[in-house]
Amino acid sequence: MAASTTVLDGGWGWAIVVASFMAQLLSYGSPQSVGVLYPEWLHAFQEGKGMTAWVGSLVAGVGLIASPVCSACVDNFGARPVTFFSGIMVAGGLMLSAFAPNVQFLIFSYGIVVGLGCGLVYAATLTITCQYFDKRRGLALGIVTTGTSVGAFIYATAQNELIVLYGLDGCLLIIGAVALNLMACAGFMRPLNMPGYYLKQKAALERNTGEQLLEKPALNGLKITTGSTASTPEKTVKELLITTDAKDLANQTEKNKGSFLAGLAIIKIIKKKQQAYTKYIHSMYEILQDQAMVAFCIAIFLFSLGAFPPVLFIEDVAQSEGLVEEVSVIPLVSIGAIATCVGKLVLGILVDIRWMNSIYLYAFTMFAGGVALFFIPITKSYVGLQILSAILGFFSGNWSLTSYITTKIVGLDRLTQAHGILMFFGGFGIMLGPPVVGWFFDWTQSYDMAFYFSGGCVVLGAFLLFLLTFPCLSRKHPEIDRPDVHYTSNCDKVASVACI
């Protein structure tokens, strides 16, 4: 299970790309096309646009805000079990939403439960893809992240048809059942390195086994019958891995039974756990000392705050302005999604060019997307909205660059931690954006001021990212390649977070 350069950029890595692509498609298909469901929820529950917008903002934002926790889960347990568990969360949340009696219940079932499941999928798929690719990492990440866009394109049209045929409740039940296929995608995610949980338990087992060999009590533990030619272990290695921590605690308390030293032994074990968490927090603090990383976090926040609302509101904008009486055969959400898919692939290819500065490329896409947002309020035709949806969707494909840029800034060894911090800022912006736009409409009965505000946020983020990473103003050049860490033995990788 040790990683080496010989297994990167090919082989089973492409199976990982396909599985990760399908995982993002199945998990993010409905949340990315939530703009189709939004008018239906407005009609069904008769709540304000601001309140109803919390459903769409939370499903996209909660998973990203929880990215540090999701990344820690991937570090400790690996991408395969995390993806498997996320399939249960996403499918369960979608099916539960079919029985929602009000918007508040929908905020929990669709916004929080499905959102957390998507966050786990996102962290797992990007992390394992970065581990399997080096020189072609940009292309691989571009392909994987197009899964969300292809899913949005398919689900936007499919959900329209399912609502007509089976109603809103039947639609949610069906797409929830389809999401169960996430558990099948998890089976392909073979880890290159042992997850932190296994490493920690293996080290504890080896320590425990070494003590047993010195004290010669191993025969009792394995229960070998005298005179027999074969031994029959009572417990398998897997069981020993799971119970090692409990044994350590029991041994410590048994040795000091009847004295206050037993309590001290327990406190010592607890302190070891706390030290692991302290190291993890200190590592996150060190990451945020990098000026380029701080600039990228601010840019992600402002971009998410301004660029995500069109995904949720663009269909309602067309209907409110009287540009279309009902959702068209190919919704605006689908047009934006397929443009995002193209953008992710194109930007993923561009960023692999040796002389291309990935941070400045990201800043340019932010600026262009912000300008497109300024044109939405002054567009008075449905064709114009289709063109702007395509432009904004294409430049929103810069999400495929986030993991690539993060790796460039902090290195592969700190990718999961740094990416978790970055997605926290992105999720916070996504969570605030749609309610703010909805409140603007509730106050002014128009989307004009809301989209001017959104465009201003995105353009401001682009300028800040460019200025703070400019060589003359930054403390460290943003494009310095730090050596990626490859593990040659199981003990080389140290878990960054203690097992919970």
Image (cartoon, helix red, strand yellow):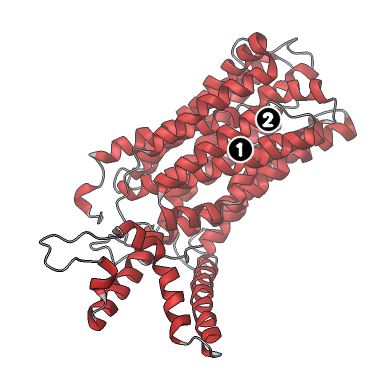
Residue 277 locus on image (x, y percent) = 52, 70
Q: Quadrant of residue 306?
A: top right
Quarter of the figure with the N terminus = bottom left
Identify which residue is drawn at 72% across, 44% down. Answer: 432
* Number of callouts: 2
User: Which type of secondary structure does the marked residue at label 2 adopt?
Assistant: helix
From the image, tell me which residue sits under label 1: 114
Which is nearer the eye, 128 or 277?
A: 277
Identify which residue is drawn at 46% across, 27% down. Answer: 342
Query: What's the residue type where badge 1 is placed?
Result: Val
Residue 303 locus on image (x, y percent) = 62, 44
**Residue 238 visible in the picture:** yes
Query: What's the residue type where badge 2 is placed?
Result: Ser
User: Which type of secondary structure does the marked residue at label 1 adopt?
Assistant: helix
Q: Quadrant of residue 108?
A: top right
Q: Quadrant of residue 233?
A: bottom left
Identify which residue is drawn at 40% across, 64% down. Answer: 243
Residue 2 higher or lower than 389, as above or below: below
Q: Which mark is residue 449?
A: none
Identify which residue is drawn at 46% across, 46% down. Answer: 82
Mark 1 vs 2, N-terminal side: 2
Residue 32 locus on image (x, y percent) = 59, 30
Residue 360 higher or lower than 194, as above or below: above
- In contact (CB < 8 Å): disc 1 and disc 2: yes
Residue 87 locus on image (x, y percent) = 50, 37
Q: Judge left or right: residue 341 versus residue 486.
A: right
From the image, tell me which residue sits under label 2: 97
Q: Judge left or right: residue 114 versus residue 186.
A: right
The answer for how far apart the CA atoms under marks 1 and 2 are is 10 Å
Q: Of discs 1 and 2, which sits in the foreground?
A: 2
Neighbour class for label 1 at 10 Å: few (<14), some, many (≥20)? many
